Image (cartoon, rainbow, N blue to C red):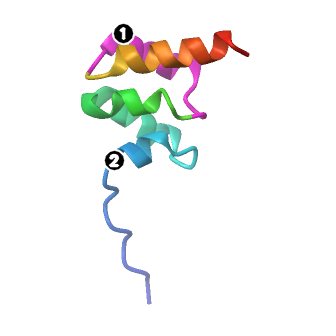
């Protein structure tokens, strides 16, 4: 007997922020879900290429999220 398939992944801010979210899902969010891009900035697994893409693509709240990230890096 085989197991039933997993339910579809619901894309939410929690998924976008979670370090447990796979890179393929993060890139999908970056490319197709502009309203969640700002949350990718808060994900500790978001790499430089992903953040650059998000910065260039923009979206609601992205600029503010990036400003907060850069300010936090300056304080370290």
* Vertical arrangement, residue 23 with respect to residue 74, above or below: below
What residue lies at 57% left-to-right and 44% top-to-bottom?
19
Q: Is residue 34 left or right of residue 49?
A: left
Q: Which of marks 1 and 2 is nearer the N terminus?
A: 2
Residue at the disc numbered 1? 56
Where is residue 35? Give x, y as percent: 26, 31
Q: Is residue 30 magenta?
A: no
Q: Does the magenta stretch include residue 49?
A: yes
Asked which secondary structure carries label 1, the reply is: helix
Answer few, some or many: residues within 10 Å of disc 2's Cα (few below 14, many 20 plus, some between 14 and 19): few
Magenta stretch, overall SS = helix
**Observer-nearest of 8 and 73:** 73
* Vertical arrangement, residue 68 with respect to residue 41, above or below: above
Where is residue 30? Give x, y as percent: 36, 28
Answer few, some or many: residues within 10 Å of disc 1's Cα (few below 14, many 20 plus, some between 14 and 19): few
| Rendered-image quadrant of the N terminus | bottom left
What residue lies at 51% left-to-right and 31% top-to-bottom?
42
Which stretch did the figure color magenta?
Answer: 44-59
| Rendered-image quadrant of the C terminus | top right
Residue extending furthest right? 76
What residue lies at 48% left-to-right and 26% top-to-bottom?
41
Closer to the eye: label 1 or 2? 2
Q: Which mark is residue 12?
A: 2
């Amino acid at each position: 007997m085989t197991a039933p398939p997993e339910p579809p992944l619901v894309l939410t801010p929690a998924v976008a922020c979670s370090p447990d979210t796979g890179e393929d899902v993060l890139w999908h969010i970056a490319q197709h879900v502009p309203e969640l891009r700002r949350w990718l900035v808060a994900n500790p697994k978001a790499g430089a290429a992903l953040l650059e893409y998000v910065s260039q693509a923009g979206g609601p709240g992205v600029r503010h999220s990036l400003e907060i990230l850069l300010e936090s890096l300056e304080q370290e």
